[in-house]
Amino acid sequence: MRYTHLFLVELLAEGLTKRFGKTVALDNVSFRIERKGCYGYLGPNGAGKTTTMKIFTNLLRPTAGHAYINNVNVQREPVRALRSVGSLVEDPEPYGYLSVREFIEYAARIRGVSKPDIEYLKNRLDLPELGKRCSNLSKGQRRRVFLAALVAQDTEILILDEPSSGLDPKEAQILRDLIKDLKRERVVLLSSHLLYEVSIVCDYLYFIYNGRLVEQGSVEDVSKKFTSKALRVEFYSKPERLEGVLNTNFVFEGERTIVIHYDGSDEQRRKILDSLYPLGLRSFSDAELGLEEAYRKVIG
């Protein structure tokens, strides 16, 4: 089924299918992105995330279906379609023979930006010394320099495939803060297998599993749809004999904390807590499990 293009659409997938021999990497994937914000493409490794990103950046041709950017078919007119796109797919690296400053200036210049604010980018992304050769940078530094170059290009759309890969916790936080700023004026399509990452920066989610879109919606709507009642219980020491005490599902969070799913009734809540007090219950609280529950139910 084709969509009717009556107005500008930023990103559009129409029945994208990709086969590698007998393996189906993408199976009739369709979605559309029409407004600025950050869109999370969430799924485990091997789900089809990178394949989708490669099709949208013309690094792969689909077996069937079409990808459009601003109403331009990516496969038929790639130069025109990708004019407004900056992308980080798989593991690109800055040119090693250039300095940090030279690479950012080069990347900006090929997109028509003559004077990028390199000092701002250096401070914003905690870049290494601007005169340092890119070949002498660590993996995390190279990733941040490449991201700085994308920002310097000032494109309307950013396609980021697992952008936090290879970053340490501090670098990943810098990236998340940057994306929060960028999404105010751009479309950001971000793939990740990290639920925590997408829950912080994304406005809308697509869940992909075994090459198929299995769920989609705003972060708020998905959370509400899949939210289940749960208790988070902490004990003074590691509890014993829980299987014989609890008649409902639970999972450990660390050695002394468990999360218990229940039917939401006050009666069952009271029974659960009564049964746990003799085991050394220290504290309890309601657990927020909307996105966690969605991921568990639709992806497993």
Image (tube, rainbow, N blue to C red):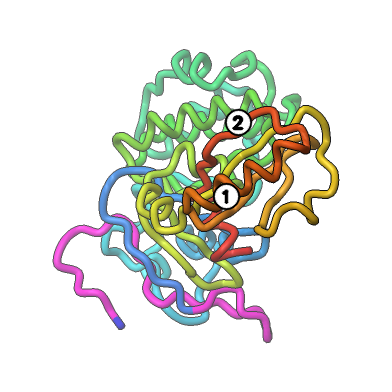
Q: Where is residue 23 in the image (x, y as percent from the top left)?
A: 67, 81
Residue 85 appears in the figure = no
- Residue 5 among magenta residues: yes
What label sits on residue 192 in the rendered view?
Answer: 1
What label sits on residue 111 in the rendered view?
Answer: none
Q: Position of residue 22 (x, y in %)?
A: 68, 86
Residue 272 appears in the figure = yes
Residue 137 picture quarter: top right
What label sits on residue 172 in the rendered view?
Answer: 2
Amino acid type for the residue under numbered disc 2: Ala
Distance from label 2 to label 1 (Cα)?
13 Å
Q: Which residue is drawn at 48% across and 48% down?
A: 266
Q: Residue furthest bottom?
A: 22
Q: What stretch is highlighted in magenta?
A: 2-27
Mark 1 secondary-structure assignment: strand
- Residue 202 among magenta residues: no
| Residue 246 position (above or below residue 125) | below
Amino acid type for the residue under numbered disc 1: Ser
Sequence-first tag of 2 and 1 = 2
Q: Nearer the viewer, residue 254 or 24?
A: 254
Q: Which residue is drawn at 47% across and 53% down?
A: 265
How many residues crowd mark 2 within 10 Å: few (<14), some (14–19), many (20+)?
some
Q: Which residue is drawn at 30% across and 64% down?
A: 72
